[in-house]
Image (cartoon, rainbow, N blue to C red):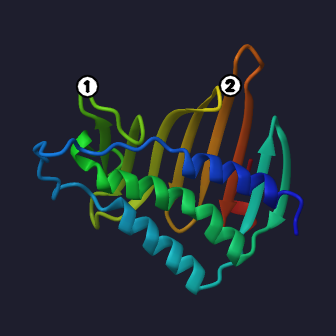
Amino acid sequence: MKPWIPIICSLLLIGGCKSPTSQSAAGAPVADTSAFYPIGAFIREQIEETDINNLPRILRYTVQEQTSKHPLGRDSFLLITRMFDSVLQQFTNNKHLYAESILHDLSTNSYTLTYKPLPGKTGVFEYADILLNDQNRRVKRMNIQRLYEINNQQINEHLSWRTDKGFLISRTITENEAKPTTEVIDVSWEPEKKFQL
């Protein structure tokens, strides 16, 4: 087993299992969310497509500015992507807690969909941005920001998906008065020259 796999598995279990969840109160009215973009389904399609095509994947794991690089096998890839699936499934189950806004940027020929918790509500994440091509409505990039606490650790987490290219999970962990630690999981499945740290 690769030496970095247990570290990443423990990080993903912390983030996946202890993610904040919210459920609607019994009998509370739920808003119609049919207009929301199906980001969970999109990410699952991306994962399946990468898996079926068996694209070569590279993992870069960085802790406190020290980076290691490794090929990433299928099982490890599917394990890491569970983080996105878990977070987006929670979002899908609780869309009534979020407001959607849309910005059309003519200079980049794109739409940006932004999701934020409604006033007085607590959601799975602080915000999510989805950048869409305004011609074919295809996702270019997705970013999610989460803040949560586990065992007296404050975790500021950024999840980013680059369509047909890769994804990134970045965390800054603060505990009491200790200096924050930063770790980054960066997975790509395009030629090396297209990705730089």
Dot 2 amino acid type? Thr
Please tell me whether mark 1 sits on a helix, a strand or a loop: loop
Mark nearer the N terminus (1 vs 2):
1
| Residue at (47, 46) in percent of width and height | 143
Residue tagged by mark 1? 120
- Dot 2: element: strand
Asked if residue 23 is positioned above or below residue 46 in the image, the reply reads above
Q: Position of residue 107 (x, y in %)?
A: 33, 44
The CA distance from mark 1 to mark 2 is: 26 Å
Q: Position of residue 136 (x, y in %)?
A: 29, 67
* Residue 20, position as x, y percentages in the image: 46, 41
- The reply to whether the C-beta atoms of the residues labelled 1 and 2 are less than 8 Å apart is no
Residue drawn at 16 percent across, 59 percent down: 34
Q: In the figure, is residue 151 to the left or right of 83?
A: right
Residue 189 visible? no
Quadrant assignment, res 135: bottom left
For label 2, the residue is 174
Going 65% across and 84% down the picture, which residue do you hit? 54
Using the image as rendered, state which of residue 89 and residue 45 is in the foreground. Answer: 89
